[in-house]
Image (cartoon, rainbow, N blue to C red):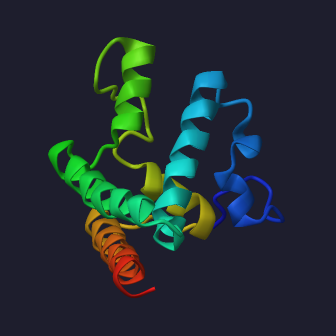
Amino acid sequence: MSVTDDDKTPAIATALPSHAAEKRDALGTLCFYLHFAVMIYIVTGWLAPFSAALIFYLCFLPAVAVQWQFNKNSCVLNNFESLLRSGRWRDPNNTEEGAWLQTLALNVTGILFKPWQMDAFTYFIIAVLWSAGLSHLLWW
């Protein structure tokens, strides 16, 4: 079973806005790239060469995780997009709200992970990255 119409399209290509250019307007594209930039920062921020940047990173990661918990697994970036589009903090028509990473994982792997699997994976990765940032701050 294929996630895309074209079986020859690499799965990673479906995660990028260029594949869904007809589906995303300018705001959707902006929000997607902003999410992607935050995700890249979360993955690479522990490599920051300055103590102040590492301290910010060590505070940012738990803030992101806590924000997900209090916001019912939804990111405030999705909520702001919903607010701009519909005037409401939550929009049931926004399929990425509360499932941006799950949608990305589905598009890349073709596997629809269960919410608890995504949570376990996400929080494990956050803990590993936070530990890497702390070790970089203390010992590098």
The residue lying at 54 percent from left, 67 percent from top is 44
> Residue at the right extreme?
8
Give coordinates of residue 22: x percent, y percent.
73, 30
- In the rendered structure, the answer to whether residue 113 lies left or right of residue 25 reads left
Viewer-nearest residue: 53 or 103: 53
> Residue at the bottom extreme?
139
Viewer-nearest residue: 53 or 67: 53
- In the rendered structure, the answer to whether residue 69 lies left or right of residue 87 reads left
Query: The N terminus lies in which quarter of the figure?
Result: bottom right
Viewer-nearest residue: 52 or 117: 52
- In the rendered structure, the answer to whether residue 120 lies left or right of residue 4 reads left
The quadrant where residue 82 appears: top left
Give coordinates of residue 126: x percent, y percent.
34, 70
The residue lying at 69 percent from left, 54 percent from top is 14
Give coordinates of residue 67: x percent, y percent.
23, 47
Q: Is residue 104 above or below residue 78?
A: below
The quadrant where residue 32 appears: top right
- In the rendered structure, the answer to whether residue 39 lies left or right of residue 66 reads right
Give coordinates of residue 46: x percent, y percent.
46, 71
The residue lying at 63 percent from left, 58 percent from top is 3
